[in-house]
Amino acid sequence: MRIPLDRQSTTPLYRQVEDYLRRGIRSGSLPSETRLPASRTLARDLGLNRLTVETAYAGLEAEGLVYSRQGSGTYVAALPPGLPQTAPAADLPWPRWHQPARPGAHRSNDPAPSDLLLAAGHPDPIDLSGGAGDIRHFPADEFRKVMQGVMRRDDLAALDYGDRRGYTPLRSAIAQVTASQGLALNPEGILVTSGSQQALSLVCQVLLSPGDTVLVEAPTYASALDLFELCGVNTVGIPTDEHGMQVETLEAKIRLHHPRLIYTIPNFSNPTGACLSGARRRQLIALAGQFDIPILEDDFVGDLRYEGRAQPALKALDPGGRVIYVSTFSKMLMPGLRVGFLTADGPVYERLAEAKRVTDLTTSGLVQRALEAYVTIGRYQAFLRRSCQRYRRRRDALVSAIHQHLPSEVCFGPPQGGLFVWLRLPEGVRGDDLLPEACQRGVAFAPGSRFFVDPADGESFIRLNFACQPPEHLQEGVRRLGEVMRNSIR
Amino acid sequence: MRIPLDRQSTTPLYRQVEDYLRRGIRSGSLPSETRLPASRTLARDLGLNRLTVETAYAGLEAEGLVYSRQGSGTYVAALPPGLPQTAPAADLPWPRWHQPARPGAHRSNDPAPSDLLLAAGHPDPIDLSGGAGDIRHFPADEFRKVMQGVMRRDDLAALDYGDRRGYTPLRSAIAQVTASQGLALNPEGILVTSGSQQALSLVCQVLLSPGDTVLVEAPTYASALDLFELCGVNTVGIPTDEHGMQVETLEAKIRLHHPRLIYTIPNFSNPTGACLSGARRRQLIALAGQFDIPILEDDFVGDLRYEGRAQPALKALDPGGRVIYVSTFSKMLMPGLRVGFLTADGPVYERLAEAKRVTDLTTSGLVQRALEAYVTIGRYQAFLRRSCQRYRRRRDALVSAIHQHLPSEVCFGPPQGGLFVWLRLPEGVRGDDLLPEACQRGVAFAPGSRFFVDPADGESFIRLNFACQPPEHLQEGVRRLGEVMRNSIR
């Protein structure tokens, strides 16, 4: 036990030991029934006389903070009720470097809608604010058995560092799964990451410097905007419509802003659900080549299509090295696994792999092995098919609930896939204003302001997740939302 | 299946489908026995006539690349032996942005010693180059049962996103474990990270900008130097001796370089094994306060002490907010879990938590829950006691092997704890030159050059890990090393 002692202090050493342990006990960091080191051991560790330690222990025992058990040692006692918890020390001011050099807008200071909903304490809350699919349909039992099998099979190897690019069989499995969806990837060009968020972060780290500009869809994924802000990167929004980014406006923006990256979610965008048209895909690739700008393609739910014609991934149209493609198993399978991947061809791949190494060495090998054992093409395709059927029904339920319960001024285009419906609110109604009351009534949504570079641009929009609730909850949630909207229009 | 089609192309659509699938099959991304989508489904997805798809499938079948199974569908055939694998497309040059803007020294381009050892193909290789403890003594069976129990107990909750600061019970468990070692932490100030490497990376992200200067020990942890380099940060080395960083020289360096961070490994340093003296600890804290510079304390194996007086963590001496403390379970327990933590008081904590969120949202909840269930104070202390006994014996074995087998000109100070012995080689012998021959003879070590800001400063040093091999392997490994050294002196 490493107790700080000041041998120059006028406070006697036994007292320093006693004070230190008392603080630990009172603050709860040494909970009751913790066995303290034998006095002989602690004395040796600290270079003290054994009697000094015994005096300290005796002092604590006299206060009732510890007790001795015959022949077994000294234990922390249960804290007497009402004993004051020690406050954190020092009224010193915090060092100046604790404050950010650039005082940013701090986009994410607002509490999460889910937390607001929870805090409101409604007996039957319905959360439509989430960003993932419905994990309740994930076969956790089956996965537990797979995990168990992997730990038996691989034993200690599962607990060691693995290849920093990712467990090789998992990279092959990823290539097979994407191929079965029409995207042929080279396993050698796949880098396993801790969710797709880390993939975005690595691309930032490798390709961007503070002060650089990134073009993004307006609106786009909120945590990507947060990431760009934290990296000190400027973001410029490109307007979107029901066919995704208005690529026609892109060239002018490129000439004006000299961006170092174009970030896009071409399939079932977060938050709008829109899908980039085929013609725009080809135009985007051509512009990226013409101006030598990398495209970061975030394909977080590209496989969740419920109808309409499938569009190829930008990566599949890439004549060579223009697109860095990012995807994840989090949305489809289990968010908590934190396994995603990126793929890039050419020299930039090595730079991304090196960034991954210095960032966190590697993603948990145990989880990678379990995922590899679980994800076979057949199983993935079957799960995808079931998810598509389920989510299609839920989308239809949400759309019909909107028609039934929301004011007719609400505008939206039902998406052909993905997780979200994006609503424009009636004139004068603001999403951020609506949220607290909606939570009181037991329904949460994601206000539109979080998805725009300038939050004011999103004031009159909200995002609803239809994938994570069964139809009857969607129906009831939208009914509540309708009440709140009508109240706020009045 | 999202196959890219060009409807303006002169290549007929059936041919585009056929070509795309052929590439996938030949490259292995569509392995044999993959079931292709039903022609009706694929035609619908792609907006094609069903006949178009059937024509494409027929073409592939004629080539023997797919076969139909009565009433079941079309499957990829086993690849005939000798069929040429398609080369990656395009002889286009890579876009310019693939190359780094700052051509760095690329410290880490050398192959890892372990890989060299493997490549050398010795029948009985002995690897002394590693950076972690010996996982072979980790009770993997027990951990498997704990993991199983957690998945049963928490079911789907274990697979969902959790609190972005880390699973609350794990943060409490960490506080209890560190308290039992003499470091009282507030669980509210603990942030769970993906290994301690991520903790270092988050501190970089929050506190440093390109061009800033960081003071580090010379020598120091190689992957920290790699991280600083990738972030565009300058590193200045502070000389060390057997009592750690020469803090007496620090003030002059601070006045000269205006550093934004001091990075230190005060306990059983990587690579030297040295421990910072108590007086220098207090002086370091005082200087950090006087010049308002944050200290990043990397305590990767602080609990692995085999003898001598325990020194308090710098964090335990911190009067308030000067020290960000980083540690990990990777070295003691299982590297592959990738769970570490940092702790900070004051406003900087929130900034670090936000950086964690935008970097990878959260660390795998499943792994956090399993670790929490596994790590109780009692179990940790017992495991620590056994590890200390085992590693002490191994250190003694390595030290006696060095005396027995290495030339007497080799200098080193046996460490009081940790994992490493740091050797100065005889005059004129360079670690990097020695390594290839040593690997041929079946022993690997970490050359000193990797641990210095200027690799040339480390030429005459090597690091040996005594913790990861049993005594007889240490003995034999050092014997081989002695032969190589004598050859290189001759």
Image (cartoon, coloured by chain):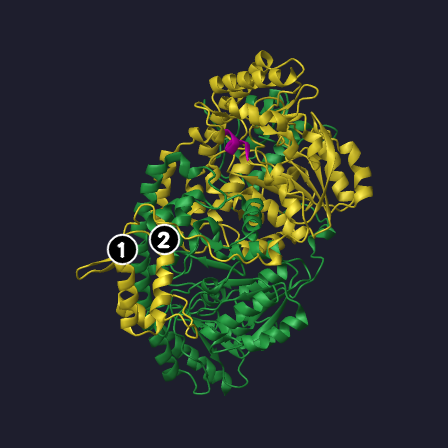
Chain colours: A yellow, B green
Image vertical order of residue A254 relative to residue B219, above or below: above
Give percent across and percent down for residue B353.
54, 48
- Residue A49 lies, in percent from the top left, at 30, 74
Q: Is residue A117 left or right of residue A409?
A: left
Label 1, label 2: how far apart the Cα atoms are: 12 Å
Name the spot of residue B255 as percent of width and height, x first: 66, 72
User: Pointer 2: what residue?
Assistant: A26
Is the residue marked by circle 2 packed among few (<14), some (14-19), or many (20+) residues within 10 Å? Answer: some
* Residue at x-position 56% and y-position 36%: A111
Look at the image and say whether residue B184 sits in the magenta stretch: no
Q: Amino acid at mark 1?
A: Gly
Q: Residues within 10 Å of mark 1 (few under 14, many from 20)?
A: some
**Residue beneath disc 1:** A64
Q: Residue furthest top?
A: A404
Q: Dividing the image into 4 quarters, which one contains the N terminus of chain B? A: top right
Magenta part of the protein: which range? A112-117
Q: Identify which amino acid the numbered label 2 is placed on.
A: Arg
SS at circle 2: helix
Q: Which quadrant of the figure has residue B327?
A: bottom left
Q: Secondary structure at mark 1?
A: loop
State the residue at coordinates (50%, 74%). B280
Camera-nearest residue between A418 and B445: A418
Give the main secondary structure of the magenta stretch. helix
Q: Please identify, in this view, whether the residue under mark 1 or under mark 2 is nearer the observer.
A: 1
Count the labels in the image: 2
Where does the image place residue A447, in percent across and percent down from the top left?
61, 29
Residue A424 appears left or right of A481? right
Chain on which label 1 sits: A
- Between residues B93 and A17, which one lies in front from this camera angle? A17
Q: Earlier in the sequence, mark 1 or mark 2?
A: 2
Closest to the observer, A186 or A289 = A289
